[in-house]
Amino acid sequence: MAIATPAAPSVEIPTIPLRELLPWLLMFALLAVLTIFFVSADQGAISIPAGTAIHEWVHDGRHLLGYPCH
């Protein structure tokens, strides 16, 4: 006597066109570049805002990532 089992439902993965992803990818790439700039290169000499405020805010993150800052 065979026991009938229901068929597993098929799951379809949606496809997203590249033209819909491109603006999001560009936005996150720009955000990543700005973040890397503020964490790695901002020493006050080329600081966008004057002073060392950004440097002090990201100071511990700089050491964690291995950037020298003193």
Image (tube, rainbow, N blue to C red):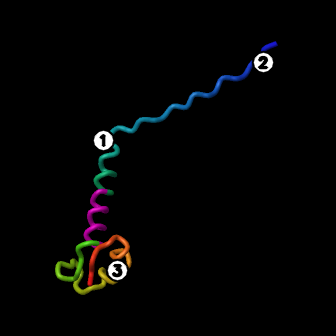
Q: Name the residue under label 1.
A: 19
The residue at 37%/73% (across/down) is 64
- Residue 22 in the image: above or below residue 54: above
Quadrant, the N terminus: top right
Mark 1 → mark 2, Cα distance in angstroms: 49 Å
What residue range appears in magenta?
A: 29-39
For mark 1, give the secondary structure. Answer: helix
Q: Where is residue 58 in the image (x, y as percent from the top left)?
A: 35, 77
Q: The residue under label 1 is which amino acid type?
A: Arg
Q: Residue 33 carries which label?
A: none
Q: Mark 3 points at which residue?
A: 59
Residue 15 vs residue 32, the one in the foreground: 32
Q: Where is residue 30 in the image (x, y as percent from the top left)?
A: 27, 60
Residue 36 is a magenta residue: yes
For mark 3, give the secondary structure. Answer: helix
- Residue 41 in the image: above or below residue 29: below
The answer to whether marks 1 and 2 mark residues whose Cβ atoms lie closer than 8 Å is no
The residue at 51%/31% (across/down) is 12
The residue at 31%/62% (across/down) is 32
Mark 3 / mark 1, whichever is N-terminal: 1
Mark 3 → mark 1, Cα distance in angstroms: 38 Å
